[in-house]
Image: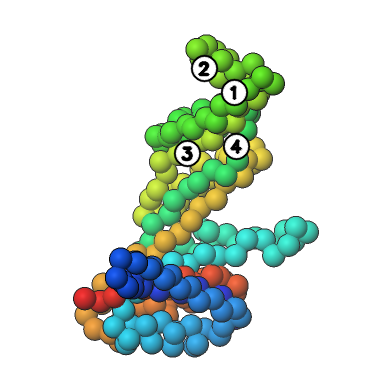
């Protein structure tokens, strides 16, 4: 099993007289073995950095592949290893008001708060008039639904996820493992290794580094 990695280093600021220069560095690697990802993580911590880690499971392998990584499986693996996480549901679909109104109803009926953003197109080719709110729901404008749907237990989101998915809307659940509460470096290393093991082949592991002052 291999992983991809991205490392975001602290910004470096250089001052030369009145000239201030900020340098940002990112390193990426592909197809890294698990042991080497752990070594990379350890090297950053031993190098005096504070390390924040995020895991991004891969999407479908290709357009013709029905195999998709399930966020529920990732959450299950984390739970089996005693790793707490936060699951957040996001709706990627967007469209005209008439297309997205059912989504608003589904989210509200499921008991979640939500916000709705609208992109109004106002030009000579549309009928949108900012002085007439009734015109804001015509087919020229684009609506997006943002549910406030997060939980420490992914099963709290399952009914909403399944309902939206069955109706053909593009929906995603991101899983963010919580930072380990470790008493020493060895315990924290073990926690990172366990988190990594819960994710499938091809996962992107992002290290965000901060100077440990």
Proximity of marks 1 and 2: CB atoms separated by less than 8 Å: yes
- Residue hosting label 2: 130
Q: Earlier in the sequence, mark 2 or mark 4?
A: 4
Mark 4 is surrounded, within 10 Å at the Cα level, by few (under 14), some (14 to 19) or many (20 or more) other residues, namely some
Mark 2 is surrounded, within 10 Å at the Cα level, by few (under 14), some (14 to 19) or many (20 or more) other residues, namely few
Image point (44%, 66%), residue name: 54
Q: Earlier in the sequence, mark 3 or mark 4?
A: 4
- Residue hosting label 4: 94
**Number of the front mark, 1 or 3:** 1
Q: Earlier in the sequence, mark 1 or mark 3?
A: 1
Q: Earlier in the sequence, mark 1 or mark 2?
A: 1
Separation (CA) of disc 3 from disc 4? 10 Å
- Residue hosting label 1: 122
Q: Earlier in the sequence, mark 4 or mark 1?
A: 4
- Residue hosting label 3: 146
**Number of the front mark, 4 or 1:** 1
Residue with the most extreme right position = 64
One can see residue 140 in this view: yes
């Amino acid at each position: 099993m291999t992983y991809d990695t991205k490392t975001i280093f602290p910004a470096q600021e250089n001052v030369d007289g009145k000239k201030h220069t900020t340098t940002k560095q990112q390193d990426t690697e592909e197809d890294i073995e698990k042991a080497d990802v752990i070594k990379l993580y350890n090297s950053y911590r031993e190098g005096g950095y504070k390390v924040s880690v995020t895991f991004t499971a891969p999407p479908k392998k290709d357009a013709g592949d029905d195999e998709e990584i399930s966020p529920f499986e990732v959450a299950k693996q984390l739970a089996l290893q005693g790793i707490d996480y936060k699951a957040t549901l996001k709706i990627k679909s967007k469209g005209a008001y008439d297309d997205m109104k059912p989504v608003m109803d589904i989210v509200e009926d499921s008991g979640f708060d939500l916000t709705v953003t609208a992109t109004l197109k106002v030009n000579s080719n549309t009928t949108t008039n900012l002085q007439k709110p009734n015109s804001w729901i015509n087919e020229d404008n684009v609506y997006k639904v943002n549910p406030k749907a997060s939980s420490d237990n992914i099963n709290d989101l399952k009914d909403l996820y399944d309902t939206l998915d069955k109706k053909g809307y593009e929906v995603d659940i991101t899983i963010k493992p919580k930072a380990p509460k470790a008493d020493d470096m060895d315990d924290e290393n073990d926690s990172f290794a366990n988190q990594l093991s819960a994710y499938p082949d091809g996962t992107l592991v992002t290290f965000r580094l901060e100077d440990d002052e």
